[in-house]
Amino acid sequence: MKKFRFGRLFSGKVRRMKHQASRIRFWWRREFDEPTILLSAAILAVGILVVIGLYAAVPDWREDFFPGIFVEFNGMLFDVVVFGIIVASFVRRMERRQERQRQQEIIDDFKKWDTEEGRLRIGGAVRRINRLGTTSIDFAGIEISDFSFADHDIKSLRGSTFYDGNWGGDSRDKVKLHRIDFSYVDCRDVVFSKLNPLIGLGLNAVFAEVKDCNFYDADLSKASFKGAHLEWTTEHPDELGVWHEEEGGRHSFEQTYYSPFCNAILNGASFADVRFTNADFREAVGVLECDFTGAKGLETCVFDDENTKIAVLEMSKRPNIASC
């Protein structure tokens, strides 16, 4: 068991390193995919190569011809840098911002329309926003079901917000995520629920409802579920698989069930004031590094071992200063 846990922790670190490397590659690809910038850089490179080649090939031109060449070249270099790169980059950033706003408006238009068309439009908008280099998307007030981010080629939601604590009767005051598959998605710093605004009144009001969702192999580092209702409508099996007896008396284990948080990275995630029903944290990474302060319903949850469950229950009994 210790070796298995160490392996999962190591795989989590490797995955975070891959995330960072992917972000660096994506930044370079995003910054230099503009035809104007590429053309300007190509002209500049060709000009430099031509001057260097002439300087090396024709020694007689070095005294009279090349001083003029370098004066003109400096002027061309200034034009390329100022107009070809800086101005083009500024214009491109403005266009990207406008395009992000347009895609965000699509999400806002369809976030309450839980239909196949609505899900397709939202998935397309999120994918296009990701391609523009943004992962922090405003999903506030969304009500959606039977949706898989990975199936729509969405790999990162890092920094996104689903419920921001708003309440008062507008479109942002309630979030419903039913049977949503977050498997393999980078969900670091995602705010699934910022808080339950009525937690101090002792009311069982539901503002963020997360039901039958799957977080298999997702990175939930520092994600927030504060005050949300996390529910799985069916109880999870006692065993993760079955043992088979093979020839020679050897035994092999076949895993037939994977928990909703299997291989999920939970380091620093907050489940403070969450109301749980049938959550299964088996094979999750970093459970004891989460915040379960004030959480309810943990007696219905499943953990890797009894000691982990006891530690989580003790953690839930701590006073939540933030909600006092």
Image (cartoon, rainbow, N blue to C red):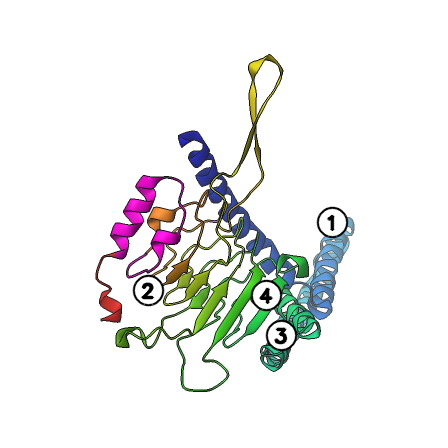
Choose between 88 and 299: the one closer to the eye: 299
Q: Does residue 297 show up magenta in the picture? A: yes
Point out the frontmost of discs 4 and 3.
3
Point out the frontmost of discs 4 and 2.
2
Alpha carbon separation for disc pair 2 and 3:
28 Å
Residue 143 visible? The answer is yes
Alpha carbon separation for disc pair 2 and 1:
73 Å
Quadrant of the snapshot with the N terminus? top left
Horizontal side of residue 229 vs 143, given as left or right: left
Q: Earlier in the sequence, mark 2 or mark 3?
A: 3
Q: Which residue is mark 1?
A: 56
Q: Does residue 187 show up magenta in the picture? A: no
Q: Earlier in the sequence, mark 4 or mark 2?
A: 4
**What's drawn in magenta, residue-wise?**
292-316
Q: Which residue is mark 2?
A: 273
Percent position (x, y) of residue 12?
Answer: 48, 44
Residue 91 visible? The answer is no
Q: Which residue is mark 3?
A: 114
Verify CB contact (< 8 Å) between mark 4 and mark 1. Answer: no
Task: Mark 2: give few (<14), some (14-19) or many (20+) Cα within 10 Å.
Answer: many
Residue depicted at 38% across the width and 48% down the height: 287
Q: Which residue is mark 4?
A: 133
Q: Give above or below for 268 relative to 135.
A: above
